[in-house]
Each structure stands twice: as C-alpha cells, then as structure tokens.
Image: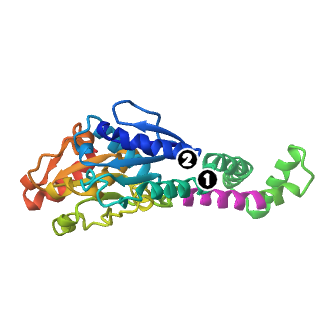
C-alpha cells in the first residue's frame, strides 16, 4: 500500500511533516504536487489531499483533482484542511479533517482504510452457451427431420395412382424403409413416432428463444441524467420518459453502479451545474467508466476549466436556444451523437 500525499507546491512543508509521521508508522508514502505523473492509484492505495488556498492556484491542480476523484470513487480518499479555503469543485461537500489534531485523525483514517478487507475478486463472467445450445438442438433434430422427409415422400408416393394408399400402406412403407437400412422389423415405425414429435418440440423451443425479448443485464438504467439540484424544476419535464434515470447519488458506490449500468450520460449544463460538486463527480465517473457523454446547455454558460477538460471535444446541444416543442427531439439527437 502506498499513501499518496497530494499538495500544492507551497504546502510541501506540511506534506513532509505528515510523510515523516506516516513513515514512523511503517507506511510507505509519496509526495504528489501534481506536476509529475505518478503511478495510478492502486486498489489498496490511499490518497491524502491537503486543501489550502494555495491549491486553487497550483500548476498541477487539474491532475491533483483527477487523482482525488479517482481515489474517492474507490473509497480511498482522505481530505485534510490546512486553512479555511474551500476545496475545489467536486470535493467541497465531502467530509474533511481539520483542526490542531488533524494529523492524529489522518493516521486513524489511514489505519482504518488499511485494515479494510481486500475486495473479493469479481465473479467470472457467465459462460455464454447460446450458440452451443442451438447447435446441439439442431443436431438432435436431424433424425426427426430425416423421418419427416421420409414419411412425406412415402405419403406422396402412396397418393399417386388410381388407388391411393392409406394408413396401413404408409406404416408398411416405413417398416420396409427401416429393414432396408438394417433395422429389425417393426422398430422403425416406433423410432419415427418418437423422433418426429421430439423434433417439432425442439424447433418450437428454438423459435420461442428467438422471438423472446432479451433480458436486460442487472443494473442497466437507460440514460443517466446528471444535473444540479437548482435545475431540478427545469430538468424534470425533459427527462420524464422511462428511459431516463434522474436520481443522482452523492455516494460513490451508488453513483458508479447507476452510471456503470447506463447506456449514456446526459450532463445538464448550467451555471449551477458547473458549480455543483455532485455533477462534477458524476461527469468524472462517466468519463472514467467510458460512458458516452452528451452535454446539454440549459443556459448560455461557459464551462470552467475542470469541465472543459471532459467536454471540450463534444459539441453541446444548446437547449436554451431550442423551441420548447423541439426539445425532446434535440435531446434524442444529443443521445444519438454521444
């Protein structure tokens, strides 16, 4: 386990003080001022983010924020306030350690994270045997298909001529067919009687499986909608369709589950959204999980640098310029282009 101590360059003395304290406890720690790319945060690592007024102007602020959010998404982030300055957007509403006894509390927090049991490995993916089942079903149906073809040919032959044959002649032809291919007399009739209904049943099962709608994987939630609480009234009528999921969570695990199961993520952009900790975290999770992102501008607002990092390459839908009657279609276009 590595304890990363993230800090603004001018806060290095405080970071070094904490580093010495942690190393006396036997924990390996590494300072991170955001100016050098470090190894990704591993499963058992901890990120301690020191928050101060200097952090806002730090050259590596964006990189530090990304690593802090990465650690938050795994439940491995510890925030520590060095002064009364607010944390960057995305971290402001998360609990932070402050006060004269902050180092002792940090040690307790790191010890608690270190003592957590390792996460169980994910279960192996279920084996997809659909194609194999289909092949086996078709193989089992071959004898019955041969029987059906033979019976039809015999029946057709019996019907030709001035005196068409009946049921007795058909049974005799089936028996003769079996004897011709080495089957004991009287056996082939019973084999046909079993194989033909069985084949019909197998083909019916294949048909039912083909037309049955596929069950959605557990956790799939359609289109996830990220928006600021202040925009709830404006967003609600836009996302009333069942395909939308507009139930944001502050908890990392719940947000990751819902966003991970979504087909795409709509980011409802506005001045309030650009100042929202929750929206920024949801945007980060969508990017981290590789989800298609569709920005929608509810108002004419320029995204700040931390939002531009994620959205600069995506053309937003300017909903505030779109007539109200055309907005559902505009949202559909945004989702389709994501």
- The quarter of the picture where residue 305 lies is top left
Q: Residue lying farthest right?
A: 184
Q: Which residue is tagged 2?
A: 44
Which residue is located at x 69 percent, y 56 percent? 199
Q: Nearer the viewer, residue 197 or 31?
A: 31
User: Is 160 a magenta residue?
Assistant: no
Instruction: State the separation of the CA atoms marked 2 and 1.
Output: 8 Å
- Disc assigned to residue 152: none
Q: Is residue 290 visible?
A: no
In this rendering, position of residue 141 left or right of residue 293: right
Q: Quadrant of the C terminus?
A: top left
Q: Position of residue 266 (x, y in %)?
A: 27, 54
So how many labels did they put on this image?
A: 2
Query: Where 145 falls versus 29 (above or below)?
Result: below
- Disc assigned to residue 118: 1
Q: Secondary structure at mark 2?
A: loop
Q: Position of residue 133 (x, y in %)?
A: 66, 50
Which residue is located at x 26 percent, y 50 percent? 88
- The quarter of the picture where residue 287 lies is top left
Q: Nearer the viewer, residue 121 or 113?
A: 113
Query: Where 273 falls versus 6 (above or below)?
Result: below
Q: Residue lying farthest top?
A: 36
Give the crowd class for mark 2: few <14, some 14-19, many >=20 residues within 10 Å: some
| Circles 2 and 1 in contact, beta carbons < 8 Å | yes
Q: Quadrant of the N terminus?
A: top right
Give, as a single range, the part of the protein colored magenta.
193-209
Magenta: main secondary structure: helix
């Amino acid at each position: 386990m590595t304890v990363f101590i993230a800090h603004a360059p001018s806060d290095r003395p405080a970071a070094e003080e904490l580093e010495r304290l942690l190393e006396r406890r036997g924990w390996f720690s590494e300072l991170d001022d955001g100016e050098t790319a470090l190894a990704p945060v591993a499963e058992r690592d901890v990120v301690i983010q020191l928050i101060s007024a200097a952090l806002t102007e730090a050259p590596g602020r964006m990189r530090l924020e990304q690593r802090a959010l990465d650690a938050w998404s795994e439940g491995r982030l510890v925030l520590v306030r060095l002064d009364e300055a607010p944390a960057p957007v995305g971290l402001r509403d998360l609990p932070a350690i402050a006060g004269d006894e902050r180092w002792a509390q940090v040690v307790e927090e790191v010890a608690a994270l270190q003592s957590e049991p390792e996460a169980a490995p994910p279960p192996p993916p279920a084996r997809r045997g659909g194609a194999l089942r289909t092949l086996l079903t078709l193989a089992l149906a071959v004898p019955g298909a041969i029987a059906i073809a033979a019976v039809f040919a015999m029946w057709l032959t019996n019907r030709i001529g001035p005196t068409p044959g009946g049921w007795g002649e058909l049974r005799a032809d089936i028996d003769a067919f079996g004897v011709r291919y080495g089957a004991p007399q009287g056996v082939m009739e019973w084999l046909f009687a079993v194989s033909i209904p069985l084949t019909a049943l197998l083909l019916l099962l294949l048909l039912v499986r083909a037309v049955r709608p596929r069950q959605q994987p557990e956790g799939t939630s359609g289109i996830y909608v990220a928006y600021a609480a202040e925009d709830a009234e404006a967003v609600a009528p836009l996302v009333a369709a069942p395909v939308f999921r507009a139930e944001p969570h502050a908890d990392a695990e719940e947000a990751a589950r819902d966003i991970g199961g979504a087909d795409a993520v709509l980011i409802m952009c506005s001045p309030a959204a650009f100042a929202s900790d929750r929206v920024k975290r949801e945007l980060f999770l969508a990017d981290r999980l590789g989800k298609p992102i569709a920005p929608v501008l509810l108002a004419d607002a320029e995204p700040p640098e931390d939002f531009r990092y994620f959205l600069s390459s995506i053309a937003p839908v300017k909903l505030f310029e779109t007539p109200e009657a055309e907005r559902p279609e505009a949202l559909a276009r945004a989702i389709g282009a994501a």
